[in-house]
Image: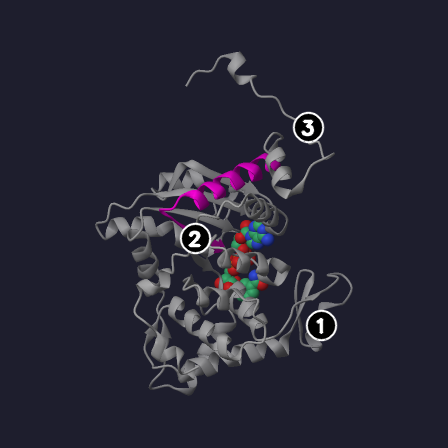
């Protein structure tokens, strides 16, 4: 493509004018006239709003890192309740150790990362995630609750989506905090997939369950997860990814396009994709790999994609607040995607 000089020197950088600026949406829009990650975030917000206005699009929220313990939970709960996402792919840390944990009534605490020797914390059974603390005894209660849930279920292979739905039913009955992703998703029939389900608090509970029940125990079938999410992709015209962090959720959600093709379905690449990540692309690793790179694998279309190189606790609230303020999801209704799978009523009733 050839460019002439005047077409390149066409759009000026505008200086952020904070005087008289009203609200977050206006700030994010104005950031679009600046540069660097501010402009990237502004475009990412536009793309997310395009997903919200596209009735035929399934929006998948991908979560890595420690976002729930860092105070991002209610934004996600509100997004579920306002039909701003249709499915979640996450690490177990966010969904089990942090969200289900808080659903049971436990909390995370603010900490000064340099104030107390970590050996001392270990003696006191306090776990640290950068500048937050967790009471290890509460976490053990959470592991044990998973063990108890598993013991009540018919021994068979469950997708993590099925198991998390049953955890939602458990919270409906025994939960002590309604502000929960797992619970809100249960109420909206919104599927949550955790492909590496045993790599978190759930793993401890499930190991104990299998060891105590050597003959008859349940198992988590991550292939079933992949199949279920692929079925959702096959059943809908378009899809969009809103990714916070990278890791397993990023690749898992992208790969369903390839899996759909393998099953002889002419599935479109993800039409929209936004990723907020602190990783960069130089190491060739997945978390910082660009969405353009994902296009070479046939997973993501390059038309509406945006990487935002930023820490998610800063960038995600801005993106979400602007989308809320602009009312981009007003015309959207819940997709209730979990209803496409066989009922779990019998298992849920055991909670
Ligand atoms: N994070 C925890 O505290 C924790 C606790 C228990 C278990 N685990 C388990 O460890 C495994 C790996 O977790 P993971 O994939 O989240 O690994 P991870 O925490 O290394 O995150 C993956 C990548 O996402 C990006 N990222 C993470 N947090 C970010 C943020 N706040 N802002 C922007 N980008 C961010 C980074 O590029 C990072 O390399 C999972 O199975 C998880 O369940 C994690």
N-terminal-most mark, 2 or 3 = 3
- Look at mark 1 in the image and give the residue it sits on: 121
Q: Quadrant of residue 119?
A: bottom right
Find the distance from the CA under tag 1 to the CA under tag 2. Answer: 37 Å
- Look at mark 2 in the image and give the residue it sits on: 60
- Look at mark 3 in the image and give the residue it sits on: 15
Question: Viewed as shown, does residue 314 lie left or right of 257?
Answer: right
Q: Quadrant of the C terminus?
A: bottom left
**Is 49 one of the magenta-colored residues?**
yes
Please provide the residue range marked out in magenta: 37-62
Residue toward you, 198 or 49: 49
Within 10 Å of disc 2 (Cα), the crowding (few <14, some 14-19, many 20+) is many
| SS at badge 1 | helix
Q: Is residue 67 visible?
A: no
Q: Where residue 6 appears, x then y in whole percent?
A: 53, 12
**Is 112 one of the magenta-colored residues?**
no
Residue toward you, 49 or 331: 331
Note whether 140 is above or below 255 in the view shown: below
Question: Viewed as shown, does residue 266 lie left or right of 310?
Answer: left
Q: Quick one: which residue is furthest to the left in this view?
A: 264
Q: Residue at x 61, y 77 (%)?
A: 138
């Amino acid at each position: 493509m050839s460019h002439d000089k005047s077409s390149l020197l066409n759009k000026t950088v505008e200086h952020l004018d904070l005087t008289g600026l009203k609200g977050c949406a206006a700030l994010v829009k104005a950031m679009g006239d600046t540069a660097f990650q501010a402009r990237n975030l502004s475009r990412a917000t536009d793309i997310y709003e395009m997903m919200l206005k596209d009735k035929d699009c399934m929006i998948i929220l991908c979560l890595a890192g420690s976002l729930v313990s860092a105070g991002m939970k209610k934004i996600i709960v509100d997004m579920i309740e306002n039909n701003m996402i249709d499915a979640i792919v996450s690490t177990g840390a966010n969904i089990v150790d942090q969200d289900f944990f808080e659903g049971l009534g436990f909390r995370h605490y603010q900490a000064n990362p340099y104030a107390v020797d970590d050996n001392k914390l270990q003696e006191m059974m306090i776990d640290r995630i950068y500048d937050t603390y967790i009471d290890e005894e509460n976490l053990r209660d959470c592991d044990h609750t998973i063990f108890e849930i598993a013991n009540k279920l018919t021994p068979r292979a469950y997708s993590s989506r099925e198991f998390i739905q049953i955890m939602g039913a458990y919270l409906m009955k025994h939960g002590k905090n309604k502000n929960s992703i797992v619970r809100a998703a249960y109420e909206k029939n919104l599927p949550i997939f955790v492909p590496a389900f045993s790599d978190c608090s759930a793993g401890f509970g499930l190991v104990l369950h299998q060891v105590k029940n050597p003959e008859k125990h349940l198992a988590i079938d991550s292939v079933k997860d992949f199949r279920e999410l692929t079925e959702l992709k096959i059943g809908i015209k378009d899809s969009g990814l809103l990714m916070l962090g990278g890791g397993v959720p990023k690749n898992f959600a992208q790969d369903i396009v390839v899996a759909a093709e393998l099953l002889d379905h002419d599935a479109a690449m993800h039409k929209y994709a936004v990723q907020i990540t602190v990783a960069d692309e130089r190491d060739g690793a997945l978390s910082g790999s660009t969405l353009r790179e994902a296009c070479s694998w046939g997973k993501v279309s390059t038309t509406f994609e945006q990487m935002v190189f930023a820490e998610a606790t800063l960038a995600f609230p801005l993106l979400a607040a602007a989308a809320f303020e602009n009312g981009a999801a007003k015309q959207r209704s819940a997709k209730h995607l979990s209803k496409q799978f066989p009922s779990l009523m019998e298992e849920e009733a055991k909670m």
